[in-house]
Amino acid sequence: MTLKIGVVGTGNMGADHIRRLSTIIANAQVVAVSDVDTEQAKRMAEVAGRARVHSDGHELINDPEVQAVLIASPGFTHAEYTLGCIEVGKPVLCEKPLAPTAEECLRVLEAEQAAGTRLVQVGFMRRYDKGYRDLKQVLEAGEIGTPVQVHCRHRNASVPESYTTDMGATDSVVHEIDVTRWLLGQEIVVASIFTPRRTSRAHAHLQDPQFFLFETTEGVLIDVELFVNCQYGYDVRCELVGETGTAELPEPAGVHVRRDLRHSVPVPADWRDRFATAYDTEVQDWVDGVRSGEITGPSAWDGYATTAVAETCVRALNEGRRMEVELIARPAFYR
Amino acid sequence: MTLKIGVVGTGNMGADHIRRLSTIIANAQVVAVSDVDTEQAKRMAEVAGRARVHSDGHELINDPEVQAVLIASPGFTHAEYTLGCIEVGKPVLCEKPLAPTAEECLRVLEAEQAAGTRLVQVGFMRRYDKGYRDLKQVLEAGEIGTPVQVHCRHRNASVPESYTTDMGATDSVVHEIDVTRWLLGQEIVVASIFTPRRTSRAHAHLQDPQFFLFETTEGVLIDVELFVNCQYGYDVRCELVGETGTAELPEPAGVHVRRDLRHSVPVPADWRDRFATAYDTEVQDWVDGVRSGEITGPSAWDGYATTAVAETCVRALNEGRRMEVELIARPAFYR
Amino acid sequence: MTLKIGVVGTGNMGADHIRRLSTIIANAQVVAVSDVDTEQAKRMAEVAGRARVHSDGHELINDPEVQAVLIASPGFTHAEYTLGCIEVGKPVLCEKPLAPTAEECLRVLEAEQAAGTRLVQVGFMRRYDKGYRDLKQVLEAGEIGTPVQVHCRHRNASVPESYTTDMGATDSVVHEIDVTRWLLGQEIVVASIFTPRRTSRAHAHLQDPQFFLFETTEGVLIDVELFVNCQYGYDVRCELVGETGTAELPEPAGVHVRRDLRHSVPVPADWRDRFATAYDTEVQDWVDGVRSGEITGPSAWDGYATTAVAETCVRALNEGRRMEVELIARPAFYR
Amino acid sequence: MTLKIGVVGTGNMGADHIRRLSTIIANAQVVAVSDVDTEQAKRMAEVAGRARVHSDGHELINDPEVQAVLIASPGFTHAEYTLGCIEVGKPVLCEKPLAPTAEECLRVLEAEQAAGTRLVQVGFMRRYDKGYRDLKQVLEAGEIGTPVQVHCRHRNASVPESYTTDMGATDSVVHEIDVTRWLLGQEIVVASIFTPRRTSRAHAHLQDPQFFLFETTEGVLIDVELFVNCQYGYDVRCELVGETGTAELPEPAGVHVRRDLRHSVPVPADWRDRFATAYDTEVQDWVDGVRSGEITGPSAWDGYATTAVAETCVRALNEGRRMEVELIARPAFYR
């Protein structure tokens, strides 16, 4: 049977998900949308076909036709809406972050545990990228031995003026935090940040690039270069270094062109270009999981641990020193 | 609205399409299946959900609930079923070939023209592969100038004993014939075949590899190495040579592994592995096209021209000489 | 002891060799040069240090201080000077071709056999390119099984107006003829030429590109795309296809640059850029061989067989048909 | 005229240089060798031809036939022999390090300044690797803008048991210290070391891998992963990140082989394999420079600054904190 979905938030991300659910995802239908901007909500309701428009997310969540909820509203509202879904027992795919603070994430963990059943998935789409999945498979097949280091690059051509230094950790590197935790099956417990020479291409208020060093429970050292005004394109890289070999995330396949004394392939322009298929796979997998009663994507625990590391990064940067991440013991429910 | 589809043929290819339509394609539903092997048809009807089972393809085509037909039965039945679809005015996606002989293809062309509306799409899925599409875009953007040559490789790890020398052209190279016609927007009008030293890894009856040389209406020279017992994997390559540059089909992205003094990436094992996404895109595009009333995929003309070239290849090989392809003038209907 | 060398011909090629022998090659010294342009010869004598200038090549060959001769004069003079060296028993490195006609080459073969000792090396430098050597090693180690096909590309950015269609075979593809013979250890016995659509970037008199198909004694099929006005750079490629795998000539290593939405490496501008190190290795190897009394480079037989195939190519192109190469039986002296 | 060279030290490194000077380098001749192991010295004297054997390095330095000296004895003797060369005014190529301590290096700086002419070159051969030179050219051509970061990898398949944790900085990373200083034209002024999980493949006493972070005078952040028991091969990488693009050191060109479902290229086994040509170029350049009176390679200042950074690394690792490098002001003589 087709899964009837309500989408909270119809801005860029929500609009993209509505289009995706309507034209690419099998066995799903958007039956309701909500947004504080009701005009935008109405436009997206038409794209979705015959979807109902709610002016309030909680109203949508309580709409009896809605079987599952996708939250794409601004980050500070995520925890509240997710708690609303848990209250009525509806599965929810919440865009990252689960919440901007670890404290709020903990409230979601508690509510979900009280509900006694897994309802929450957090939208870390990189776990659905074919490249990262293949990378995990290579690691788990033992092809490179026990991992000792991970090297990551996260580069955007540019960011808007609204992007702040703290968002380096909370908005961007949060993807590396989640995906390396998932690749390694280890928690990140220490963070240090280094600040290289600032590029002259960033807005004056922004420290760009930033260099993150993470240490895991088992001593793996993860470094992440974040450079959000690198000018040349969107470039995400990841190299796992094991005791007997290394494995690197594939770069996107592109046509090889030889002209004007150069042999070249294209670099993606932005994350949409790079991760479009990962989003499709993520949402299809969530729809399939909800329909079959088995949600296997990033959990509320992942949402919490990731936010906790990002928070620590902000403190480590401000205090200029290596800092430990404070994590609660992982509840049995999330093992 | 969901498109209600009947699938004729539930063997390997048909089963794959039924699974695809049921779990990956948006806005489509398999409502009927047919096969001479009714047990297999029943099994696949269950995979599809609540699909009806017909023992005869024509019965399925005439099933009033069926809005569109996908033909995946053996090649020699394709023309007959396609003609059946045209007769009742239902859109049809016919797996390649449209028919084993140019003559039968011509009957389909005539019927479709008489019907006065485009109903037939032929299943050349490579046109839906992202790599080939990017290649066409590079060419059409003028990045490499006017094309003068195309180099293709078509390699399979191995083929079953039932694979004959003629099938080199009719089953395998037929993909290169279609996709280079499409890339260039030109017809192939001459074919020559060279036979290199036979590999000892092929069955005794089989000439493997074969080397095809095609000449187009505008003088572009296309060479295709076909090697269907190359042992090492499935490998499809295509290089366009233009007056100012060259463009190559991307190889599938894979994890880069360094171990044991080698730096390596995986080679796909077979065409399923290599072209799975292309099939998904092809079928979604067809479903979208049927729903919106605009079919834009490979036409019956493409099915005809491709079969005509393949037939000429078989003759050129048997007679050991360069041969011209006999094509009718392209009807205005197909321009 | 230092080998005392005389260089016949001080044009582009000769000047390059004189500079090489004076500044890069160990245990060699240019003691004499000759050229019909005596002014140029004098300039190059100074580059070489204290070299004597002869106005005539035969005079240089007979100069008692000259222990070995490098011939870099125009091709039509090669056989004559090589015969001169044989007459006085001096080792000679003759730039390719050994002679423009197979007939003249045969005279050299006879003279060298009569002399009873190997004196002649022909300047096919590709055999000294690290890439080609590694390729041969991979083949001989059995990594790809018995070879069945070879695919070659030979592309120049552009050629001067003096370059004629026949020179495609005699000046350019002659390198592929020699190097594939050497890689395979087989003679080429049949040639066919195809003429793709002409590029608009070539001079009006020139058929460019040309497509060569060679068949060897053991049935290996070799194709060579020659495209001497490809505009984008100098590009030489070679893929060996064996029964169990394939091996490709490495492209020259270059810095990977990412900028402006492209990831690119440089393409060499011309053959000097691409094969400079191969020339160095060739000449050092020849000097070492002469000093130790063991010349192992391309022999007069290779010079003859290569010219014979090139001559056949010119006829095959003019007559528009597949032609057999007429070769004498290989004398025991050259086995 | 041929440069007459004395080689101090005929162990692995010295033997390699003697062979190089005798068979590959133009215009050079080994006329004297010395080693505490006189039997080994005699063997190498024969390889060199008619070289004299000295039992003592200072005796060799004072040998009137010796015009220039190459020092390849153990590191702790380097400063002493270099000072000996300065005393008699003979040009010297001293293998790295110039000396194991910054203090000893300073004595060499003082002596050379007192001598008033540049006599010392330190054997940092990476500056002569074509890849690094191309990288520097890309940077200096402005292709990637002002540099902000550098990422380096230095991996060996394995090291002998005698290799200690400190040697990570003083023997291995010293190459990255020199070559990034040269690439950037900046001094390294701060060092931090991180210690990832230890590989189980190293000897128990060894911290392997190590992760170095350097900061330059202009704020560029350089990270170096050192992993000397990586098992899979010898792998040196370097990526420059500029304000508008990135540039990566080319990996060595190798034959592309496709077999057994993998597409692979070889990884070098060790540094000899990887940097053989760089050593050749280094020594030829030094010989040419001595002959023409212009030495342009790594200076005594480079030897000093590099040792000073390596010493700081050892302290930073032992004290577990970020440490500043203490450097004297650069004397005008070395600008």
Image (tube, coloured by chain):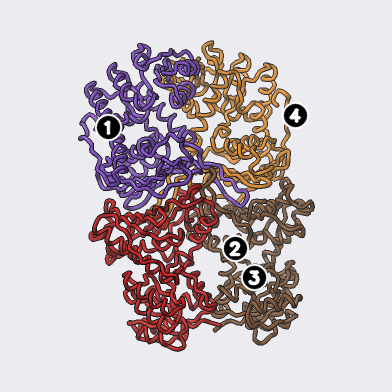
Chain colours: A red, B brown, C orange, D purple
Q: Which residue reaches farthest bottom?
A: A64
Q: Residue at x 33, y 53 (%)?
A: D244
Q: Please state the horizontal and vertical placement of residue D68, each as a whole percent of the image.
A: 36, 19
Tell us which disc is closer to us: 2 or 4: 2
Q: Amino acid at mark 1?
A: Ala
Question: How far, Cα to Cα, is label 2 from label 4?
Answer: 50 Å
**Residue denoted by label 4:** C329
Q: Amino acid at mark 2?
A: Phe
Whether tag 3 and tag 1 are in contact, CB under 8 A, the answer is no
| Image vertical order of residue D66 relative to residue C256, above or below | above
Q: Residue at x 59, y 43 (%)?
A: C238
Chain letter belonging to callout 4: C
Whether tag 3 and tag 4 are in contact, CB under 8 A, the answer is no
Quarter that holds the N terminus of chain B: bottom right
Q: Amino acid at mark 3?
A: Asp
Tell us which disc is closer to us: 3 or 1: 1
Assess disc 3: are there few (<14), some (14-19) or many (≥20) residues with their C-alpha within 10 Å of its C-alpha.
some
Is B186 on the left or on the right of D310, as rendered? Answer: right
Chain letter belonging to callout 3: B
Q: Same chain for marks 2 and 3?
A: yes
Q: Secondary structure at mark 1?
A: helix
Q: Please state the horizontal and vertical placement of residue C47, each as a whole percent of the image.
A: 41, 22
Chain letter belonging to callout 1: D
| Image vertical order of residue D247 relative to residue C312, above or below | below
Assess disc 4: are there few (<14), some (14-19) or many (≥20) residues with their C-alpha within 10 Å of its C-alpha.
few
Q: Same chain for marks 3 and 1?
A: no
Chain letter belonging to callout 2: B
In the picture, the disc for residue B16 is 3
- Of residue C122 and residue D8, the one placed in the foreground of this image is D8
**Residue denoted by label 1:** D102
Question: How far, Cα to Cα, is label 1 from label 4?
Answer: 71 Å
**Residue denoted by label 2:** B275
